[in-house]
Every structure is written in C-alpha cells, then in structure tokens.
Amino acid sequence: MLAEIGLVSLFLSFVASIYALAVSVYSTRRHSDRLLLSARNAGLLTFPLLTLSCLVLWIALVQGEYQISYVWSVSNPETPLFYRLTALWGSQKGSLLFWCFLMSAFAFGALILNWRSHYRLMPYVIAYLMATQAFFIGLVLFMENPFERWWLISTGEAVEALLIPANAVAPSAARLAETANGLNPLLRHFGMIIHPPMLYLGFVGMVVPFAFAMAALASGDLSTNWIKATRRWALVGWLFLSLGLILGGRWAYDVLGWGGYWGWDPVENAAFLPWLIGTAFIHSVMIQEKRGMLKVWNMFLVIGTFSAVMFGTFATRSGLIDSVHAFARSEIGLPMFLFWAAVTLISVGLILWRWNRGELKDEHPFVNILSRESLFVLNNVIFVLLFVAIFWGSFGAPVISELFFNEEITLGREYFERVTPPLFVALYILMGIAPLSAWGATSLRRLGRALIVPLLLTAAFLGFMLLTHTAEPVALIAYGIVALAGAVVIYETYRGARARRMSMGENWLQATLALFQRNRRRYGGYIVHLGITVIGIGVIGSTLFQQETQQTLAKGESVTFGGYVMTYDNFTDAIADDGRRMEIADVTVSRNGQMLAQLRPRHDVYPDMPMTIAGSYSTLEADFYVLLVGWEDLGASSATFKIYINPLVNLIWWGSLVLMLGTFISAWPHEQKAPSVQPAALRDRRAGVVA
C-alpha cells in the first residue's frame, strides 16, 4: 500500500507541474489573471504531493518494507534508524526524488514570497520552474522510480516492477530481509549524510534566479526587478552550495584515508563549477543595480550558473565519469543531456534576441580601470577562467580524447595544481583592492592611500608568521596576498564604526552592530570575505607544509615525527553493532613529554568494501593525522602506520563557519511593506480560485 500511495502522489505532482507550465504560458496569451492564479496554485500543489512521496519512502525505509526494491538496496535489518532516514538520498532513485522535493520547496517559496511584488514576471517564472521540475519528476516517474517492488514470476525469477506482473507473487519478507544490501559504507559518515542535501539545496536554489532572469527576458521587464527578486535566493543557493563543498571535503578527509580534503576529483569539480559562476553572478549583479551596467553579461552568468548545475547533475548521474562520489551508470544520461542543451540554447537565444533589439544596453560606460565596477569585471573574468580551466581538466579533455581519438586520458592533480593557483592569487588580490575602490572613478593616489593601513596590518601578520618559523618566501607571499583581503575587511569595518562613533556618539559595540544592521549586504559580504581569507590561510598551510611519513612499529615502540611522539599500544579486532568488522590500532600521541591524545585508527571491513578511518588529534596549529596501513600477523605484534602533520587545516572548517555567518547577515531581509498585487489578481485570490 505504501508503494501505491507514493507512486500516485508522484504521478499527481507530475500532472500538476505540466498543468502549471501549460496554463502559465497560456495565461500570457489570454492576459488572464484567473488562469495565472490557477497555474500558480497547481505549482504550489506539487510541494505537498512530493512531500507525501518522500514521507512514504521514509516510512518504508524505517519499517523495513524490503519488497520495495529501493528499500532493499539501501538498508537491511541491521541498519540503524538514523541511517535508514538518510538512506532516502543514499542512491540514485531516492536522491532524484529528494531533488524533486527540494525543487518543489524552493518553487513554493518563490511563488509565495514573490507573488505580489513581482506579479508581472510570475507567468514565466512559473513556466521555467515547472518545466525544470516536471523534467526531473518525469525522470523519477518513468526511469528511476524508487517505488518499484520485487516480484516472483512463474519461472521463479525475481524481477523489479511498478505494477504486479501476470501470475506473480510477492517474495518472502524474511528472504528479502536476509538478502537486503544495506547502505553504502562510504555514506555512513556525518559529513556525507549532510553533504548531498546541502549540494542539492545549492543546485535547486540556483534554479530560482535563472527562472526570474528568463522571465525578465520573456516579459520584456529588463529593469533590476528580477535581480531584486532573486538576490536572496541566489545567496541561499550559494550558501548551501558552499556548505556542500566544505562538508564533502571534510568527508574525504575523514573517510577516504589519503590525508587530504580536495583531490580535484571530477565529481568534486562538477559541484565546484556552478559555485564559481554563481559567485561571479552574485558580485556582478551589484554593478547592474548600482550603475545599470553589465546587463548582457549578468544574463549569461545566470544562464551559466543554471547550465553548470544541470551539467553537474548530468555528469554525476549519467555515468559520464567514474568516481567514488558518482552514482552508477544510468539510462537517464541522454534525456538529461538533451534537457540541459535545450534549455541552455533557448535561454541564449532569448538573450541574443533582446540584445539585437537594443533592450540590454548599459546605462553608463566604463571610465576608469581602477573603478569598483572595472575591478568587479576583472574578478568575473578570473572566475570564468577558473571555470574554463577546471571544466577542461575534468571533462573537456577526457571526453574529447575518448570521443575523437579513442584514447582515455585523465588530467590529474598536477594539472589543477599548476593551472589554478595563479588565478586564485589574482582573485585574492582583487578581494583586497576592490572594496577600497569607488564606483565610477578612482585615482591611483586615492587607492594607494586607502591601502596603507591594510598593508601595515598584513605586514604585522607576516611578522607573526616569521615568529612561528615560517620563512619560506613562496609561503610568505601567498600568506600576504590572502591576509591583505582579510585586513581590508577589518579596516573597512573599523572605518565605518569610527565614523558612526564620531557622528552618533555610540560606543564601539553599538557602532559596529549598527553598521551591520543598516547595511547588511555590504558588511555581511565583508564577513564572507573574511571567512574566505581564513579558509585560504588554512589551504596554504596544509598544502605547502604538510609532512608525511610511514613507519612499521612493534607493540610498545614509538616514532618521533614533526615534534610529536606516537607509541603503538595495542590492536583490537571487534564486531560493531551493525555487523561490520573493525580492526583497530590503539596509539598514544605525546609532545614534550606530555600525553596529548589516545587515537584509534582503524579498518572497517564491510562485504567487498574495506575502509580506512583515520585517527587525528586536532589543534588550531595542526592536525596529527594517522592511518593504519597494515599489520603482519594475527596478533598484530607489529603494524604499519602512515602519519601526516597537516598545519592549519582546521582553519578551513572554522573559516566555513565565518562564511556562513556572513551569508546569513547579507541575506537577512529588511522589514519592508510589499507592494499591493494587481487588482484583478487580488479579486481572484479573494474568490479562492484554484487549479
């Protein structure tokens, strides 16, 4: 019965999406507020329907309804309740359904919150949102349905089917429970449990700005209304995408057992690409709002962000690339590729049409290379160059080589670590200079004066690094460039607070809080920059100064490395509650004769998938990170360990918290009265017209 309820609600959500799409487009031809309201109500209805589908699948996972093949494939009787709940996005079918649910939630919010204030854009917003949603629901309904069940046909063979085949019976519940697969061991980690929902929220969040931008092109309302409608949606999507990337890095650091957090894996890069273009878009739209410039460029950026989201989803779900992060090869690849290509081409065609009509002309020319808008454009160019370089290394070169030369090539970490650092250096330099520049025109003398204090702060920071015995010239240059961006944030916030103290008589705390309250967008952005500065310092330290060694130790024997002493104490072979075998080494870490921590690096042995789990002792200074590589006999009288010292790596995780805080501040809405809706639409709403 659960499968039938989930399937029917999924089908009804597909019908409602198609109806909303068709009627919203038709309402523009008939100029009918009643039809538009009906389309909107149908779009809103998809959210509770998809919520019901997800709830049904959750209940099936919790109750162990193993006749549902998806439940059978991602859980078993030993799976803890927490992992049963998170198994909803543990494989292709469930994660696609979850993607649709999140898409419907964002669409619901956009249609509710922007209905009155941006009524003219609504027909096209509904059309684009529902077209995207209907496509993904269609994939789930017709190609990757999580409500398929196991059936025994007359030959005794077990088959998966939505409806009962002729003369088929349900398999024994006990037999299904015995053979159930259980959740992929790689997903049994808090970071990986939260990482996919964050990425999905980031992906679907970026669809909303795209829908409003295309609505502006289709309706001819090419003012900044669509930007005002979507700024917070873009920030929310960007925040979740950022968190997804950070959590993915943490998962790799804890679970994959190679001592790092970012391996330039194609699937990692597939999520990073929309972040790059989305970041450029968030910066670039400020120029259009302030100066009426870059109208065409902003349209291409928002299309590029949506296109990168669609391509990333296609790449990870179609089998285009092999990766520990990717889903299995699937038949959905071709329709996803065609949808991505079609929407991108239609959107580009709309831009070119409006451009040729002269409706996307900039209101002001660029007058100074040092003006804030010029520096923002340079910032955008670097983001795009990063996008191109990473896309080429991850997908372009491998796919072209295989298609046209029948040769498989992979551009590994060496390519990315050679190509991307100069571009990131340029980004950090612009982060330090652009906030000090003015809109319109800035003289070199004025910019130089504004840089004096940040440069002094940066010099003080480098002096501190020298005191910590960091004397490598490359590292000091890198630290200085990154620290300058943070110094500018501190200096600009100080200047604003000082001005308020002098004019308003407030104390430092009151003045600073008032700054953030009155201009959340600007100062929230500064906090984001500060978070990225902290992350940058962590990346430099953990990349340039990572130390590594491998040692075989007998029980009771010690190794000294990086100022730490590690002693191999004991070895334990145990069985966990969920049935996995754990092979654990007990080690003690000390420094200067003082014991710091007792760590337990281990192997988790699942059927056909062993995992290496690190033990780590973390401080702000560094991580002592140890892996159990192997042991020689049954009693493990000796064992081999790989040890890493990862300096400043925890600044990456702390910087991400600062980034979150800044994004929340920037996106937090001001209290304002919404403009009233058009009279005809208001009459329809009061009349309670429904789809």
Image (cartoon, rainbow, N blue to C red):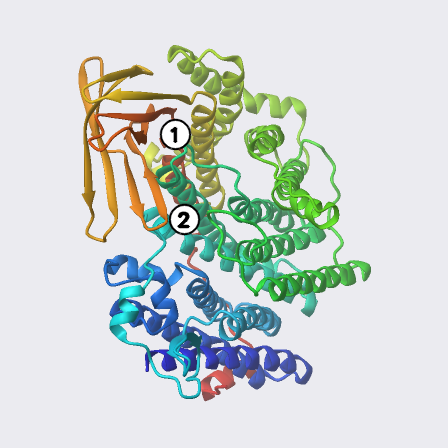
Q: Quadrant of residue 7?
A: bottom left
Residue 447 against residue 264 in the figure, above or below: above
Can you give x and y, in whole percent of width and height, for residue 503 in the image? 43, 35
In the image, 355 versus 604, the foreground residue is 604
In the image, 500 versus 671, the foreground residue is 671
Can you give x and y, in whole percent of width and height, for residue 13 in the image? 47, 78
In the image, 446 versus 420, the foreground residue is 420
The amino acid type, in three-letter code, at marker 1 is Val
Mark number, residue 649: 1
Using a 10 Å C-alpha cutoff, classify the residue at mark 1 as few (fewer than 14 neighbours), some (14 to 19) or many (20 or more).
Answer: many
In the image, 352 versus 644, the foreground residue is 644
Callout 2: SS = helix
Query: What residue lies at 24% left-to-right and 42% top-to-bottom?
Result: 582
Please name the residue that numbered disc 2 is placed on.
664
Mark 2 to mark 1: distance in Å? 24 Å
Left or right of residue 155: residue 22: right
The amino acid type, in three-letter code, at marker 2 is Phe
Residue 657 against residue 651 in the figure, above or below: below
Using a 10 Å C-alpha cutoff, classify the residue at mark 2 as few (fewer than 14 neighbours), some (14 to 19) or many (20 or more).
Answer: many
